[in-house]
Image: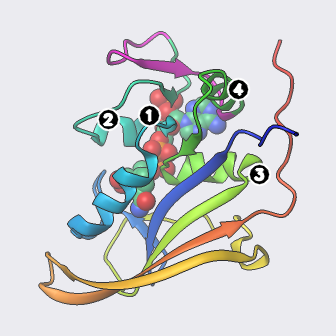
Amino acid sequence: MAEKPQLIAAIGAVASNGMLGLNGWLPWDIPEELAYFERTVAGAALLIGRLTYESMDVVPVDSFIVTRDTSQAMRPGCTAVASVEEGLVRALATGKPVFVIGGASVYAAAWPYCQRFYLTRIELPCAGDTLFPASIPLAEWPVVDEHAATYIERLSAQPVVCRFLQYAQPHPRPLPELV
Ligand SMILES: NC(=O)c1ccc[n+]([C@@H]2O[C@H](COP(=O)([O-])OP(=O)(O)OC[C@H]3O[C@@H](n4cnc5c(N)ncnc54)[C@H](OP(=O)(O)O)[C@@H]3O)[C@@H](O)[C@H]2O)c1
């Protein structure tokens, strides 16, 4: 029987006005959504942009941090990589499923290689300074899984609907051979 190909997926969340970041963190405070993220990526190898990496309290082992300055020291279990392609190749070499966890610049460069995009659509416009990249053609990808839940968004103290979508990219780009 043919072996199942190793997963490369992206995961993120976006407000209804397209915002995904504010002041180096998330524009909303929804612990249940964060818990969904943590459950989904548990045990995976991660590809992370340098700014997002710096915003995280805890970074799991087998995390690959994209930066132009690969000489900088990283936390234990974390490796600096010079491109998303290098990071994805090295993350796959761990044998684990691979999740691209953002931020925006890393989603924009890594999406062509992703089989899946786990995207939480937060049905609330939020103030922000970083937009979800408009270049990712999610509207052309079929939704293969979807569920929704209502949680309290703590900054506004309002109930908010979160739609947990899984998009499947029909023809992900193969990773290049790296020398
Ligand atoms: N809503 C969500 O799901 C979600 C998920 C993750 C992050 N975020 C939010 O997104 C915001 C950060 O996003 P961001 O786009 O500003 O930053 P980012 O993607 O986290 O990090 C940007 C940095 O990554 C490095 N980088 C990116 N692309 C590269 C490439 N092709 N080659 C080499 N290095 C590359 C550069 O690091 P150097 O400057 O070191 O060269 C760049 O400055 C934060 O507010 C964060 O909280 C939201």
Q: Which mark is residue 89?
A: 4
Q: Is residue 149 above or below residue 118?
A: below
Name the disc covering residue 157, or none. none
The x, y position of residue 127, in whole percent, is 31, 76
Per the image, the residue denoted by label 2 is 54
The image shows residue 90, relative to residue 84, as above or below, that is above
Which residue position is annotated with label 3? 112
Callout 3: helix, strand or loop?
A: helix
CB within 8 Å, label 2 to label 1: yes
Ligand 1 neighbours mark 1 (CB distance < 8 Å): yes
Real-space CA distance between mark 4 and mark 2, rounded to the nearest whole angstrom: 22 Å
Q: Nearer the viewer, residue 17 or 148?
A: 148
Residue 145 at x, y percent in the picture: 60, 75
The quarter in which the C terminus is drawn is: top right
Q: Nearer the viewer, mark 2 or mark 3?
A: 3
Q: What's under tag 3, amino acid-wise?
A: Pro
Q: Earlier in the sequence, mark 4 or mark 1?
A: 1
Estimate the x, y position of residue 128 in percent, counting from the top left: 35, 69
Residue 44 percent coordinates (x, y) = 49, 37
User: In the depicted view, which residue is nearer to us: 98 or 135?
Assistant: 98
Q: Which badge, 3 or 1, is on the more N-terminal residue?
A: 1
> Residue at (62%, 61%) from the top-left corner?
117
Q: Quadrant of the N terminus?
A: top right
Magenta-drawn segment: 71-84
- Mark 3 vs mark 1, CA separation in Å: 20 Å
Q: Which residue was labeled with disc 1?
A: 50
